[in-house]
Image (spheres, helix red, strand yellow):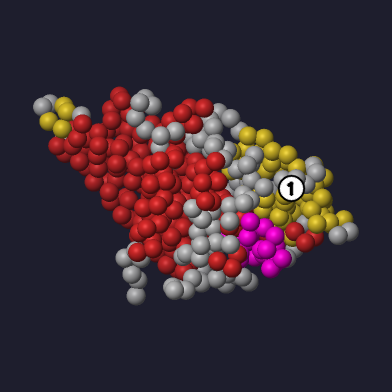
Amino acid sequence: MMNFDFTQEQEMLRQTVRKFVDKEILPHIKEWDERGYFDPNILKRLAELNLMGVCIPEQYGGMGMDYNSLAIVCEELERGDTAFRTAVSVHIGLNSLTLLQWGTEEQKQKYLVPQAKGEKIGAFGLTEPNAGSDVAAISTTAVRDGDDYILNGQKTWISLCDIADHFIVFAYTDKSKKHRGISAFIVERTMPGFSSRAIKGKLGIRAGNTGELFFDNVRVPKENLLGEEGEGFKIAMSALDNGRFTVAAGACGLIMACLEASVKYCHERKTFGKEIGRHQLVQQMIANMEAGLQMSRLLVYKAGFLKNKGRRNTRETSLAKWMACDFANKAADDAVQIHGAYGYSNEYPVERYLRNSKAPVIYEGTREIHTIMQAEYVLGYRQDKPLRKMLPAWEEK
């Protein structure tokens, strides 16, 4: 039976992250957004709260909480700004959980433990200039050379490109096998031939660090092969199940931020002799935000429920990511409309919400990709097969 109540521990977690956002992010985010500046100290302070490994088992340095606790963290962080939820999504959702699922014990001890403690930061390198939704179109290669692999290629739109210490990178070890010839590697920033460069001029998430990775004959030891040769595509898809879950949870936080800002403004602004919240068309927009928030949360926590049970959740996570991000984009658009001309300036935060809301509709599967996925599930064209490895189920203590 599904339980919709949060545990006392989860309620405390929500309040902890909310207080952190109110104190450490909201007073500074307008300036950081204008400057295009990512403050790495935020990650250090999150580590001090043991949040950089919130759902990683205690034996690997984490807090040992469940996957819906990760959703709570992401929701509250995005209430502050999408940039910091994105950082946690990439570090935990795409990297650390992938190491937990696919890594050897040696890899977990070397990379996962310091990441869960927040001593090191992890990121994820899949997208390339000519390969986004079409993962098989990547051109990065990994050629075996004795006890090493030699990586050459380029990745783009990589979050934490200049911040992360470790990257999970996908490359072809056998191009003739198409997507079955893709393999995954753990790459360290300090490896010779590796470099990164930030992308400037983004529409939104300007307070985030996003950019390109370059691999020029980067020598990676065979011990850093994640999974087996040819399993890269499966590993990438399983990682996206976790990343999309955190993106969907974050979208709930953005809707919440839009609601909070809009409700406040509705009580402050008066037109035609009454608060604008008394006008029915404004109420309609507020009601739609609330409906979007509650529906998105249900989808997110259902996906988290399946993750806690150790069950495959690609279909449910896809639906949550698609719907929550679309609801967030619409909520931000309505929030600007409610604020009128003031919503068009950075005097109020809603213009930043609107700019930030667009990227999640695109990354980790565009809305078009998720639309096709959902239709194919219903039509019977798509069925999920069990993976060789699954994330461990979470057992309530």
Comparing 77 with 47, the one in front is 47
| Magenta highlight range | 97-114
Say which residue appears at 48% left-offset and 31% top-offset: 33
Rendered view: 348 above or below 136: above
Could you say where residue 240 lies in the image, as x and y percent from the top left?
Answer: 55, 56
Q: Can residue 133 be seen in this snapshot?
A: yes
Task: Look at the image and tell me in which quarter the N terminus lies.
Answer: bottom left
Give the left or right position of residue 375, taking residue 62 as reference.
left
Rendered view: 72 above or below 377: above
Task: Look at the image and tell me in which quarter the C terminus lies.
Answer: bottom left
Say which residue appears at 44% left-offset and 34% top-offset: 29
Q: How many marks?
A: 1
Could you say where residue 18 lies in the image, as x and y percent from the top left?
Answer: 38, 48
Q: Magenta includes 360? A: no
Q: Which residue is disc 1 drawn over?
A: 140
**The quarter of the displayed image where residue 237 is located:** bottom right
Q: Secondary structure at mark 1?
A: loop
Could you say where residue 82 lies in the image, as x and y percent from the top left?
Answer: 46, 42
In the image, farthest residue toward the right: 146
